[in-house]
Amino acid sequence: MYNLAHISKTGMQATQIRLDVISNNMVNAQTTGYKKLENSFVDTYTETLDKRPYPNNREDNVSGTGVKTSEAVRRYNQGSIKQTGISTNLAIDGNGFFSVTTSTGQTAYTRNGEFKLDANGRLVDDNGNLLQVTYDDGTAPQDANLSNGDLSIGRNGEVVFNGEKIGRINLYEPQGTNDLISSGDSLFVTKEGATMNVVEGSKIYQGHIEMSNVKMEQEMTNLILAQRAFQFNAKGIKAADEMWSIANNLQSR
């Protein structure tokens, strides 16, 4: 009975974590550039049933001791591209991330291309993070002024202002698959010692943004399955409680 209660408890705990991940994905389904999280269930240690009080006819019989969730993994597959018609909005078709500089001077990476021009004519996101552009004349991104003119950004990242090529927007990707850490607001920072490489072959679409890669129908299905699993494990604890109650009543007679 104790094993039944313990296994059911671990199942409820793991399912609750799963529900939290699904809820986070659903809340961010309309967040530009959001990348969904996924986790899975893994078994904990097993124990042998080859014990004197346990009648069995095989020495290799084992019993599970519960379940837990794996660490949530970020899925970076591309979301759908939506046309906005805003010249400063950018979407990546392929691999890679935009590089931005935060207000604290930290370099971060994002797929959210919902950029705009600030009061100084610089390309920034909604939180004021500065898009990194490599200018041909060595101008620092924080000193460039792209206002009061015609801005055109090519599929290869070339920046043309008033008919003249002035620089390029490079895209970056980590060398390892788990080298990025989410820092919120669709931004990612690198782990210590991680290397970011310039991406070749991906395209940048001006006047477009990339939506999240969350599929609501899949998340709804996962939500229903997780809720059913939670209810099933709750019934396991209830059954163990009823069995303890019966045993206590027998002892008191």
Image (cartoon, grey):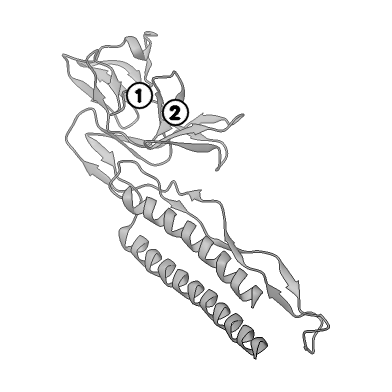
Q: Are marks 2 and 1 in contact (CB under 8 Å)?
A: yes
Q: Quadrant of residue 192?
A: top right
Between disc 2 and disc 1, whose residue precedes?
A: 2
Query: Which labelled disc corresponds to residue 108?
Result: 2
Q: Residue at x 29, y 21 (%)?
A: 123
Q: Residue at x 83, y 83 (%)?
A: 52
Tell me if residue 141 comes above or below residue 176 in the rendering: above
- Residue 49, x across and y down, in percent: 76, 79
Q: Could you give the CA–CA distance between mark 2 and mark 1, rounded to whole angstroms? A: 9 Å
Q: Which residue is mark 1?
A: 129
For disc 1, the neighbor class at 10 Å (few under 14, some 14 to 19, many from 20) is: many
- Residue 139, x across and y down, in percent: 36, 9
Query: Which labelled disc corresponds to residue 202?
Result: none
Q: Residue at x 49, y 63 (%)?
A: 15
Q: SS for tag 1? A: loop
Q: Callout 1, which amino acid?
A: Asn
Q: Quadrant of residue 142?
A: top left
Q: Quadrant of the N terminus?
A: bottom right
Q: Is residue 171 left or right of residue 208?
A: right
